Image (cartoon, rainbow, N blue to C red):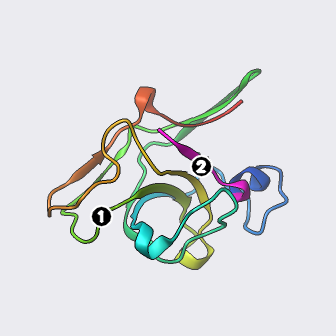
């Protein structure tokens, strides 16, 4: 899976970001499916994205820090009754209450299976290998 770790998230961990600190354990972390036609090309320097479609809450996020790095884990999420354009990206972000100020954390632009995905009105389930969705080492 290709992964884009957003520099806004990384600098927020150091307290030097545009947005406030992102606490994966206590903040509301959501997943969204994004269409590249609407989103354009998302890069590591993309701070936030204000056209989030079909967001869903990422359930049971936990973090673990060890000497060798940190991991963020989740059991995943399900988007229900999805319609619309092909989703080229899956992104995790901190929900600040306004999409225009909700910082992106991590974005996937491909996956071992599933991306891009064409909505057909059914559910789209997201799971992470070993429940780990982000690693900092």
Quadrant assignment, res 8: bottom right
Determine contact: label 1, label 2, CB under 8 Å: no
Quick one: 73 or 87, which is closer to the camera? 87
Q: Residue at x 25, y 71 (%)?
A: 84
Q: Which mark is residue 136?
A: none
Residue 135 appears at what percent x and percent y? 62, 34
**Magenta stretch encompasses residue 68:** no
Most extreme residue toward the left, as rendered?
A: 121
Residue marked by disc 1: 86
> Label 2 crowding class (10 Å Cα cut-off): few <14, some 14-19, many 20+?
some
Q: Is residue 5 magenta?
A: yes
User: Considering the image in quadrants, where does the C terminus appear?
Assistant: top right
* Residue name at image x 51 percent, y 42 percent: 2
Provide the residue span drawn in magenta.
1-8
Where residue 9 appears, as percent x and y from the top left, is: 69, 54
- Assign a secondary structure to mark 1: loop
Q: Nearer the viewer, residue 26 or 45?
A: 45
Residue 43 in the figure: left or right of residue 79: right
At 28% from the left and 70% from the top, the residue drawn is: 85
């Amino acid at each position: 899976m290709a992964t884009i770790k957003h520099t806004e998230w990384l600098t927020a961990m150091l307290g030097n970001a545009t947005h406030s600190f992102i606490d994966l354990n206590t903040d509301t972390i959501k997943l969204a499916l994004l269409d590249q036609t609407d989103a354009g090309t998302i890069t590591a320097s993309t701070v936030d994205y204000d056209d989030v479609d079909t967001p869903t809450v990422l359930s049971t996020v936990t973090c673990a820090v060890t000497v060798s790095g940190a991991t963020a884990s989740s059991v995943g999420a399900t988007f229900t009754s999805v319609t619309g354009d092909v989703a080229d990206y899956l992104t995790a972000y901190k929900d600040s209450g306004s999409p225009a100020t909700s910082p992106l954390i991590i974005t996937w632009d491909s996956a071992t299976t599933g991306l891009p995905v064409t909505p057909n009105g059914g559910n789209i389930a997201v799971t992470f290998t070993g429940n780990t969705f982000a690693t900092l080492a």
